[in-house]
Amino acid sequence: MIRQPKRDERRQIIPLIELIMQDMELPILEHTSPEMLYAMLEEAMLDDQFRYGLKNTLVFIHEGKVAGAIFGYHGHLEDAIDDPFHRLYEDYNTPHQIPLYEDKETMPGEWYIDILAVYPEYRRLGIGRKLLVEVENLARQQGATKIALNCEKDNTKAYKLYEKLGYTPESERVLSGHPYYHMTKPL
């Protein structure tokens, strides 16, 4: 079953976010303990304006547990999408000059898929594909005509999945020092 998450499911979702953040080697990881980052994410997720807010999230539930999640939003919101997280810096003694994300990931006019992540034990079951299809439907309902995501260049499995679903590389970019394909699909 795919749906928006419940408040009490944040603890099942945060490890998926952390996997991606660690893979990207984000600077915030050097300035916060894992426990502090977890607490900040858990609090910020309650704000609908946050990139990982519950409103911007769909989860795949398998046998009562979160097996995977996908996060997305309109690209024109990117400049302010982390404000709810940044407002927590003072409360958590985090240096204000450290952004959650340093690089622009999307463009105005796109509906952006920020993260698609599935727990390892649930991979190869079609969950990622189902989440992508469902988030495309959500983007259409929100008036989007183009959807986008970034795929790390060495992630060939993900690239093949995106390609099968109609995504094509539109450009290349570097995010946190890692090369990515910026892939788009008309809706």
Image (tube, grey):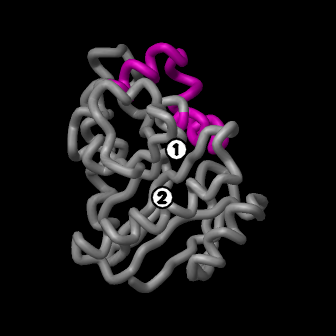
- Relative to residue 57, is residue 23 drawn left or right? right
Q: What's under tag 1, amino acid-wise?
A: Gly
Going by the picture, which residue comes out furthest to the front?
A: 63
Q: In which quarter of the image is the C terminus?
A: bottom left
The residue that disc 1 covers is: 68
Q: Is residue 138 above or below residue 12?
A: below
In the image, is residue 21 part of the stretch drawn in magenta?
yes
Q: Tell me what residue is drawn at x 36 percent, y 14 percent.
A: 93
**Image location (x, y in percent) of residue 95:** 41, 24
Range drawn in magenta: 16-42
In the image, is residue 100 part of the stretch drawn in magenta?
no
Q: Tell me what residue is drawn at x 33 percent, y 49 percent.
A: 3
The residue that disc 2 covers is: 131
Q: Which of marks 1 and 2 is nearer the N terminus?
A: 1
- Mostly what secondary structure, the magenta segment? helix
Camera-side residue of 49 and 145: 145
User: For mark 2, does the 10 Å Cα neighbourhood hold few (<14), some (14 to 19), or many (20 or more) residues?
Assistant: many
Q: Tell me what residue is drawn at x 58 percent, y 25 percent.
A: 30
**Image location (x, y in percent) of residue 36:** 44, 16
Q: In this view, does 163 lie above or below 57?
A: below
Q: What is the CA distance from the residue labelled 1 to the residue labelled 2?
A: 8 Å
- Whether tag 1 and tag 2 are in contact, CB under 8 A, the answer is yes
